Image (cartoon, rainbow, N blue to C red):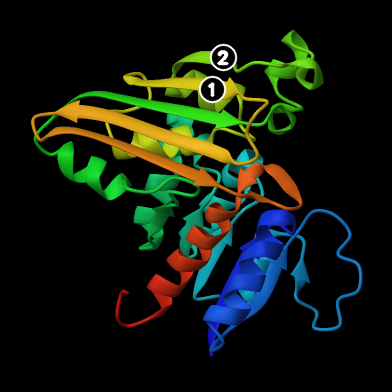
């Protein structure tokens, strides 16, 4: 029985646990690290600190609790030699934090895996950058409600929008820092391609949409590519695409299985 540790107990964590129960029955959730009250816990899986999670000896840990959790918890887990998948890759817009977790992973002999989350096709970007990329643009379109609690809500009455509205246009670092709950995918694109400063990001509130739409356009020595995904949102969190939870479960499955498929 392979052992999985989770950081976070929100909508993403619950969705991942559901997928794993169906697709990876030979694994168990041995620990769930949460800062808040865990409620009923007959299996005593809930812990409140990184050392407690490490003590449960997970084979792999999945972070799905936000940027603060990456900074506060992930370095210690990596130093303990535990492979860690980070969903909140927008945290790595902080270059100093990225350098610190890379150092902790090296010291612990652990793998740090940046999840692609709601976006796909990033293997093509990673391949293309070997011979040089000249441009990468990520465009994210979501229903207005998905931008609640972001800087967009301070500038627009989101519920009153009747036409597509560009709420951000700039580089990936600014997008990831300004929209941490919505723009983790921009960080994944930047890390896979030409970096935070050179990756252009456009974020749009689109009243006509029911799904979250992600588009990548890139060009370079390889030629050009365009990718588009239309994702259903998690029922409990309209900011997050359901595909992100599936990606997390896939990455866990890939690391724990002998053959990648």
Q: CB of mark 1 within 8 Å of CB of mark 2? A: yes
Q: Position of residue 36 (x, y in %)?
A: 85, 54
Residue 60 seen in render: yes
Give the structural element (helix, strand or loop) at label 1. Answer: strand
- Is residue 1 rendered to the left or right of residue 181? left
Residue 57 seen in render: no
Q: Compared with residue 90, is residue 168 higher up or lower down, i.e. above or below?
A: above
Task: List the residue tagged with mark 2.
Answer: 166
Q: Residue at x 66, y 49 (%)?
A: 65
Displayed quadrant of residue 148: top right
Q: Assign the C terminus to one quadrant of the image.
A: bottom left
Name the residue nearer the viewer: 133 or 222. Answer: 222
Name the residue nearer the viewer: 249 or 45. Answer: 249
Displayed quadrant of residue 16: bottom right
Give the structural element (helix, strand or loop) at label 2. Answer: strand
Q: Residue at x 61, y 26 (%)?
A: 179
- Is residue 133 rendered to the left or right of residue 34? left
Q: Position of residue 8 (x, y in %)?
A: 70, 56
Q: Position of residue 83 (x, y in %)?
A: 44, 65
Q: Compared with residue 230, is residue 168 higher up or lower down, i.e. above or below?
A: above
Q: Position of residue 118 (x, y in %)?
A: 50, 47
Mark 2 Cα within 10 Å, few/some/many (few <14, many 20+)?
some
Total marks in image: 2
Q: Residue at x 35, y 63 (%)?
A: 109
- Is residue 223 rendered to the left or right of residue 163? left
Q: Compared with residue 3, is residue 39 higher up or lower down, i.e. above or below?
A: above
Q: Upstream in the sequence, badge 1 or badge 2?
A: 2
Task: List the residue tagged with mark 1.
Answer: 203
Mark 1 Cα within 10 Å, few/some/many (few <14, many 20+)?
many
- Is residue 137 rendered to the left or right of residue 182? left
């Amino acid at each position: 029985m392979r052992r999985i540790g989770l950081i976070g107990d929100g909508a993403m964590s619950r969705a991942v646990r559901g997928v794993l129960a169906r697709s990876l029955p030979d694994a168990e959730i041995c620990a769930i690290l949460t800062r808040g009250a865990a409620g009923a816990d007959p299996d005593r899986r809930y812990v409140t600190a990184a050392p407690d999670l490490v003590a449960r000896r997970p084979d792999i840990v999945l972070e799905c609790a936000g940027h603060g959790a990456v900074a506060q918890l992930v370095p210690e887990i990596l130093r303990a030699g535990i492979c860690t998948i980070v969903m909140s890759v927008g945290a790595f817009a902080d270059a100093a934090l990225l350098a610190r977790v890379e150092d902790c992973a090296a010291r612990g002999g652990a793998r740090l895996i940046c999840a692609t989350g709601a976006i796909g096709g990033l293997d093509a970007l990673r391949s293309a950058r070997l011979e040089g990329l000249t441009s990468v643009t990520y465009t994210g379109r979501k229903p207005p409600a998905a931008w609640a609690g972001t800087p967009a809500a301070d500038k627009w009455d989101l519920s009153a929008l009747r036409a597509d509205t560009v709420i951000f246009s700039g580089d990936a670092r600014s997008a990831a820092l300004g929209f941490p709950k919505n723009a983790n995918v921009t960080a994944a694109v930047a890390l896979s391609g030409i970096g935070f400063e050179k990756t252009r990001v456009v974020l749009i509130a689109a009243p006509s949409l029911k799904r979250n739409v992600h588009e990548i356009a890139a060009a370079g020595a390889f030629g050009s590519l365009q990718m588009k995904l239309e994702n259903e949102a998690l029922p409990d969190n309209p900011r997050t695409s359901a595909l992100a939870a599936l990606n997390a479960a896939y990455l866990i499955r890939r690391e724990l299985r002998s053959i990648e498929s």
